[in-house]
Each structure stands twice: as C-alpha cells, then as structure tokens.
Amino acid sequence: GQQLNQSPQSMFIQEGEDVSMNCTSSSIFNTWLWYKQEPGEGPVLLIALYKAGELTSNGRLTAQFGITRKDSFLNISASIPSDVGIYFCAGQLRNYGGSQGNLIFGKGTKLSVKP
Amino acid sequence: DSGVTQTPKHLITATGQRVTLRCSPRSGDLSVYWYQQSLDQGLQFLIQYYNGEERAKGNILERFSAQQFPDLHSELNLSSLELGDSALYFCASSVGGLPNQETQYFGPGTRLLVL
C-alpha cells in the first residue's frame, strides 16, 4: 500500500533554532497535511496544502506542497519549548468523483526543544 | 479542544474480550473516521462513516466493526481481542460531503490495553 517516508525520525534542538522536516511518497497526493500530537492528545491540524507548489504559513510554521506532488516539508522558525511534540505529515488522494480518499500518515518526527 | 469527544479515555481488558469505543463528532460534522495508533504501525486509517453510512474502509480487521447512529455519534466495536490490539484509537470528524469541508479534527483518543 501507499507509504509516506517522514524524516527525521527525531530531533533534539536548542530553543531558538529553526527546524525542518519532510515527507516523501512514491505516490502523488492531492492534499498534504501537517499535524502535531502532544502526549495524551489527538493530532491537531497545523497546516493544510491543496495545490502543488503551494507555500502556506501558520505563525512560525511554514509548509510547502512539492511540485511533484510526492513530497512536502514543514519548517518551524525560532523554536520554543512548547513546540515539543510529534509532528505528522499526511497525504490524501482525491477519489474519482471528487470525494476524499483516506489519509495516509507518516511515522512522525519527534521534536525535543532544550530551553 | 477539537470538539470531538471520545469515551472512555482508558480501557483495560483481557484477551478474547469485546469492547466498544464511543465517539461524538463536532457539532455539524457528518463524517466520522476511526484510526488506530500503535508504536510499530503509526496512525492507520480504519474506517469512515458519512451520515450513517459506511464511506471508506482502510486496514480494519474483520474482528472490528463500526457504526454511526442517527444522532451521528459512532461506535467502534473490537472483539476477540488480542494483545496486539493494544493501541490508541482515535476518532476524527469532518463536515464531509464536499472536498473543502473534509478537514479532519481528531478527538483525544481511547487508550486500549489488552492483557
């Protein structure tokens, strides 16, 4: 089945540093999503991307939908301790007829921020 | 708070038993999705219901079943439980129906431990 390769698996950074993580797929997607999950909570949507080449920001977060539609990256600038968590990418295909397809998730990037 | 509620938060049971997990979607959302999150498999889509009817099926075992009721809440039934079924089970909801109404919002999850 479809798989997403998300990297890095984990990151240990100093507060104030910028962070970059990415996802690649062997299949093309119509939608790329980035979620953050904190301990004991469900994933929370950070950014949704709907067009190839789209670059979208949400505060200190910026994500891009790759031109090939097979990849996406997420950048976090000037990291702070509350950025700690697991970041997941997810790809989605639009089914024929326009209905949404299933979300395929990456394995996650665990981010640790040292104050 | 995503507006999606799940009960119970934790569940401990024995192998061979049957459990029911409950999800209430956000007000106005017609679609409900179930996901399983385990350490080795990550987040896996199980099944989707839209307005009471099954819409899509993912990696859901035959021992598992779900339904969505007229009030739009959903239940995931897990039977003949095995140790490997221990995982976090998430419910997500979306407005559904149209592609731009399909952003999924996740509940806090039910942590199932099978002993």
Image: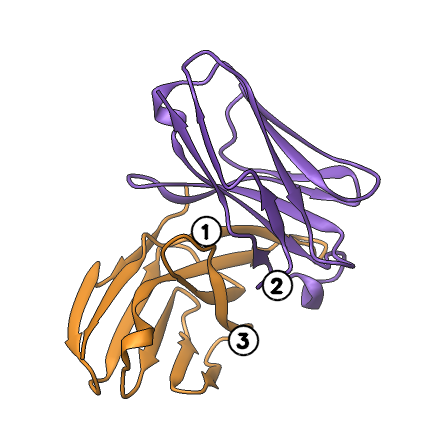
Residue assigned mark 3:
A51
> On the image, numbered disc 1 is attached to which residue?
A104
Image location of residue B12, percent across then percent down: 43, 27
Q: Chain of mark 2?
A: B
Instruction: Specify the chain shown as orange.
Output: A
Q: Are marks 1 and 3 on the same chain?
A: yes
Q: How are the colours assigned in the image?
A: by chain
- Secondary structure beneath dot 2 equals loop
**Residue, x 69% and y 51% (percent of image)?**
B25
Q: Amino acid at mark 1?
A: Ile
From the viewer's perspective, tell me whether residue A76 is left or right of residue A1. left
| Callouts 1 and 2 in the same chain | no
Task: Output the chain of dot 1.
Answer: A
Residues indicated by labels 2 and 3 sit on the same polypeptide chain = no
Left or right of A23 in this view: A46: right
The residue type indicated by label 3 comes to Lys
Q: Which hue belongs to chain B?
A: purple
Please give the residue where the numbered disc 2 appears in the rendered image.
B103
Give the spatial CA distance, label 1 vs label 3: 17 Å
Of the two numbered discs 2 and 3 in the rendering, the one whose residue sits closer to the viewer: 2
Tell us which disc is closer to us: 1 or 2. 2
- Quadrant in the picture for residue A85: bottom left
Q: Position of residue B20 (x, y in %)?
A: 60, 27
Q: Quadrant of residue B81?
A: top left
Q: Neighbour class for label 1 at 10 Å: few (<14), some, many (≥20)?
A: many
Camera-side residue: B55 or A42?
A: A42
Which is nearer the eye, A64 or B50?
B50
